[in-house]
Amino acid sequence: MLVLASESPRRVQLLAQAGIVPDHILPAAIDEAVRKGEQPRLHAMRLAAEKARAAKEKWTGEPAFILAADTVVALGRRILPKAEDEAQVRACLGMLSGRRHQVMTAVALIAPDGKLRTRLALTRVSMLRLSEAQISRYVESREGEGKAGGYAIQGRAESFIKDISGSYSNVVGLPLALTTALLAGAGHG
């Protein structure tokens, strides 16, 4: 039994690409605020673990594997927000334009025996220098709203990417190689 502690349709799609279909989807609502002085890596790891624990507490079914993840886009030590509106998408793209940034996804898994395992994938992404017109067209598409760092690599924003070093699926929202290895190592499947 696999419970996915996420409301992200992208994570469901990515798992399906790997031949994994969660038995249940149980989003975990937690406070995702960045703590003072919290580094991007630690922030992602903390949130993924908190999501997994929150889902485990809500789960009332038979013993299950609880899978959660959290993706962070960072410029150095700065964590970019999950863009809520056009202004935040514009601001994020303005900061990322012509620069290299990191995308980190922490994956947390609680096995039926209660043991928590966490792993982190890091991908470096270089974005082209964007013109105001490119940014405006992307903002108008609304594709970046609700996305960490204000862009979705699997959509129109892929044309903005100059170089990527690491897992592409990590940038979409769930590093598949890491996730499937974590599940297998814990005895799922």
Image (cartoon, rainbow, N blue to C red):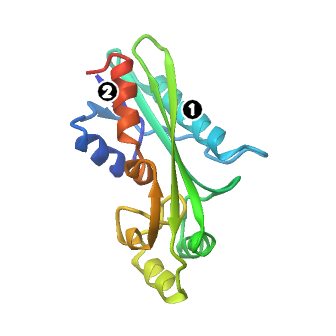
Q: Quadrant of the N terminus?
A: top left
Image: 60 above or below 146: above
Mark 2 closeness class: few <14, some 14–19, many ≥20 residues within 10 Å: many
Vertical placement of residue 120 versus 127, above or below: above
Residue situated furthest top in the rendering: 113
Rendered image quadrant of residue 101 = bottom right
Q: Position of residue 63 (x, y in %)?
A: 35, 15
Amino acid type shown at disc 2: Leu
* Tag 1: amino acid: Glu
* Residue 95 left/right relative to 182: right
Q: Nearer the viewer, residue 132 or 9?
A: 132
Quadrant position of residue 76 = bottom right
Q: Position of residue 110 (x, y in %)?
A: 45, 22
Looking at the rendered image, the quarter that the C terminus falls into is top left
Please tell me whether mark 1 sits on a helix, a strand or a loop.
helix
Please tell me how crowded label 1 is: few (under 14), some (14-19), or many (20+) other residues with Cα within 10 Å.
many
Q: From the viewer's perspective, tell me whether residue 162 is left or right of residue 129.
A: left
Residue in the foreground of this view, choosing between 16 and 178: 178
Residue projecting furthest to the bottom: 133
- Which residue is at a point 36% across and 28% down the rendered structure image? 181
Residue matched to label 1:
50
Q: Which residue is mark 2?
A: 2
Mark 1 vs mark 2, CA separation in Å:
17 Å
Instruction: Name the residue at 52% across, 26% down.
Output: 53
Residue at 54% x, 65% y is: 84
Residue at 58 percent across and 36 percent down: it is 45
- Look at the numbered disc 2 and give the secondary structure of its residue: strand
**Picture quadrant where residue 75 is located:** bottom right
Q: Position of residue 147 (x, y in %)?
A: 48, 60
Number of numbered markers? 2
